[in-house]
Structure formats: C-alpha cells, structure tokens
Image (tube, coloured by chain):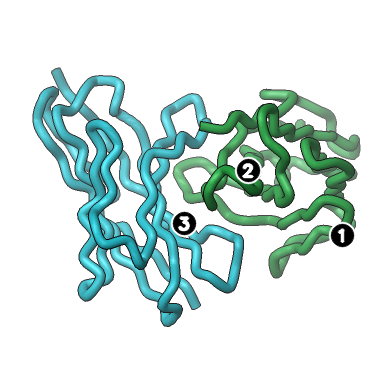
Chain colours: A cyan, B green
Amino acid sequence: AQKITQTQPGMFVQEKEAVTLDCTYDTSDPSYGLFWYKQPSSGEMIFLIYQGSYDQQNATEGRYSLNFQKARKSANLVISASQLGDSAMYFCAMRDSGYSTLTFGKGTMLLVSP
Amino acid sequence: GAVVSQHPSRVICKSGTSVKIECRSLDFQATTMFWYRQFPKQSLMLMATSNEGSKATYEQGVEKDKFLINHASLTLSTLTVTSAHPEDSSFYICSARGEGVEDTQYFGPGTRLTVL
C-alpha cells in the first residue's frame, strides 16, 4: 500500500527566506511519480512540481525545487525566496505505476510573514 | 498548465435535493477524471475514478448510488450528489488527466457544497 507522510502540520518563514517542506513516502513499486500541489485559501489545487522515480536530476520549476533522496524515500519541496503569496497549504502526493490515482499526504500549512 | 473548470463553485441546497457538479477539461482531452472530497483542514480523499465511456470506479466506502458519476465525453464529467444531507456538505474537487499532458493531474477550482 502506498503511504505519504508530511510530518510538519505548520511552518513559518519570513519573506525572502528559503523553506523546506518535508515529505516521505513508502512504496514497493520501482516506478512511481511524486507531486507537490499548493492549495491557497480559495481551495484550488495548483500543480507545482513533478519528480519521476527514474529521473536522474532533482526537478526544478522556478523558485520550487524538489530534493529527491531515493534511498531515504524522501521528496522534500524547497521554496526559495519566499513570498507572501506562498502562504497556503502544501500537499505531497504519489502515484505508482499500477494506478493512475494519487495518494496525498495530510499537508503542511505554510505561513510567510513580512 | 492544462485548465480544468468546475461548476458551480458554490452551492447551497436543502436536505433531500440532488446537486450536479460539472468538471470540464478546457484545453485537452481527459481520458480519466477523478473526484475528490475534502473536509475542512484535511487532505483530499479520492471518491472515484471515471474513464470516458465506462462506469466509474468507486473507492471503498463511497456509495455509488449516492454519488453518481457520468463521464460522457472526453472533456466533461459530472458528479451528482443524490438526496443530499447535511453530512454531505464538503468541498468537492475534480481533476483530469489526459494523454499529452504528461502524467500530471490538473485540478478544477472546487465546489463548496452546503446542505441545510
């Protein structure tokens, strides 16, 4: 069974600083994909970044990067130069090759202060 | 990224009525659509997976007769909450996945259902 763990219910960061949101996963499938989504208070789920299990390099998308450590089964999201608009709920999710469905973690609430 | 719309964004209804929520992929053909439910301060829970032209696959514990899903075309899926009750009040979000848009699921903006 798939499992996604986000151990940080809430995180605080000051504007312009970097922040790391933790995510660990558990799967026996050698082929899987890891996703991060942002959910602001409006409720929409915004896709941020994707990492495939066979990707050799860590994924990056603008200010977002994914610190993928396969042996540790971790896929932490790093947000550089935080902005006030980054305040939101962040969900880590995984999909393995056998399913098209996503399994979500419980989320981390990020608050960015001026 | 790909665009998914959802309508309505907010609905308030009386107990016992049925509510239909539409999910549309606007700029790609979605071979598979997903319906999620989210309670306040909780994560998304998958309710069902629907493939165009076939019956939806429901997750364990989700009543298929209460939550009717129709995926009649490659761009439209509907979720009908039949005989809604206050405990059905929740945030319902759809997502769509299609060929040509990697394997990413793109989410609609969600529908907040309140049953009085």
Sequence-wise, which precedes: disc 1 or disc 2? 1
Residue at 62%, 38% in the rendered image: B91
Distance from disc 1 to disc 3, alpha carbons, whole Å, reads: 24 Å
Distance from disc 1 to disc 2, alpha carbons, whole Å, reads: 17 Å
Residue at 80%, 37% in the rendered image: B76
Query: Is A39 drawn above or below residue B42 in the view shown?
Result: above
Query: Is B12 drawn above or below residue A99 in the view shown?
Result: above
Q: Is residue B53 visible?
A: yes
Q: Which residue is mark 2?
A: B95
Q: Which residue is mark 3?
A: A104
Residue at 77%, 63% in the rendered image: B57
Kind of element beneath mark 1? loop
Query: Is B115 drawn above or below residue A91 in the view shown?
Result: above
Q: Which residue is mark 1?
A: B55
| Type of amino acid at the residue the image marks with label 2 | Ser
Task: State the image coordinates of residue A105 (x, y, percent, origin top left).
Answer: 41, 57
Left or right: residue A103 versus residue B12 is left
Q: On what subunit does the disc labeled 3 rest?
A: A
Distance from disc 3 to disc 2, alpha carbons, whole Å, reads: 14 Å
Kind of element beneath mark 2? strand
Kindly report which numbered mark, 3 or 2, lies closer to the viewer in this rendering.
2
Which one is nearer the viewer's eye here, B116 or B31?
B31
